[in-house]
Image: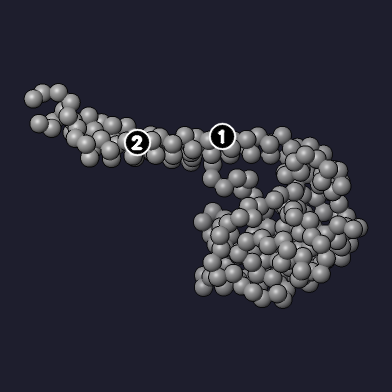
Amino acid sequence: MKGFHPGVRTTLFVMLFLPVFVALGFWQLDRAEQKRAIEREFGAKKDLAPVTLEQALVQPDPNYTRVALRGQLLSHQPVLLDNRLRDGTPGIEVLVPLVAGAQTVLVNLGFLAKATDMSVPPLPVLPSGNLNVTGYLYRPDKDRFVLGESIDTGFPLLLQRMDWGRVSGGLGRELLPWQLRVGPEQPGSFDTAWTIAVGSPSKHQGYAFQWFAMAFALLALYGYSGFKRR
């Protein structure tokens, strides 16, 4: 008998996976818009005159706010963020505590590439003493799952992700949960070609297209199998 007869199992399969593919496509579109919002926020703040740390922290959202401050860099207590990537090259980010009055913030001096054997590179002489520092505040993702985290509490402190409580305990002082990312004009900085958001909007749009294409292909196969079936 002619007509559309896809079969019960095929129909159940499509009913189960089609909403999943469509939902994942719209989720990726939403992620793309979030990344565009981050880029717009950074673009709106990057050319503004720097403010004091106190002025930045009372803002509703201090993220990406440019800050200028003077304080003492504790170069003997660096924090190294491992497993960083810069243009596909693995390395570390070097952060140094800066004490400015009653506040302590980590100054991110930038990226250092690892050697070919993937060992942590030796640190050059880091800037120290009372210095003027300008950069923008940045709070990284604190919720990434990490395997094999080191329990060493000495300095340099090697971490796979930022652990504010652990660093504060090692320093023996309360630490603001913000990095101060400096630019290439800062003396003693390394590679400071910062990535504002992980994953570009176009990348998420590409993922969305793939999910929607899979949904379309599933519908096409469903129709084909239903009309072909006897």
Residue 55: give x, y in percent of width and height.
86, 43
Residue topped by disc 2: 18
Q: Earlier in the sequence, mark 2 or mark 1?
A: 2
Residue 140: give x, y in percent of width and height.
66, 52
Q: Kindly state the secondary structure of the residue where label 2 is placed.
A: helix
Q: Which label was assigned to residue 127?
A: none
Q: Along the horizontal axis of the image, is 38 left or right of 10? A: right
The three-letter code of the residue at mark 2 reads: Leu
The three-letter code of the residue at mark 1 reads: Glu
Q: Along the horizontal axis of the image, is 102 left or right of 120? A: right
- The image quarter containing residue 222 is top left
User: Which residue: 70% across, 74% down?
Assistant: 153
- With respect to residue 104, does 201 lie above or below? above
Q: Kindly state the secondary structure of the residue where label 1 is placed.
A: helix
Alpha carbon distance from label 2 to label 1: 23 Å
- The image quarter containing residue 215 is top left
Q: Which label was assigned to residue 33?
A: 1
Considering the image in quadrants, where does the C terminus appear?
top left
- With respect to residue 64, does 182 lie above or below? below
Q: Along the horizontal axis of the image, is 142 left or right of 217? A: right
Observer-nearest of 150 and 13? 13
Q: Along the horizontal axis of the image, is 70 left or right of 81? A: right
Observer-nearest of 215 and 3? 3
Residue 35: give x, y in percent of width and height.
58, 39
* Callout in the foreground (2, 1): 2
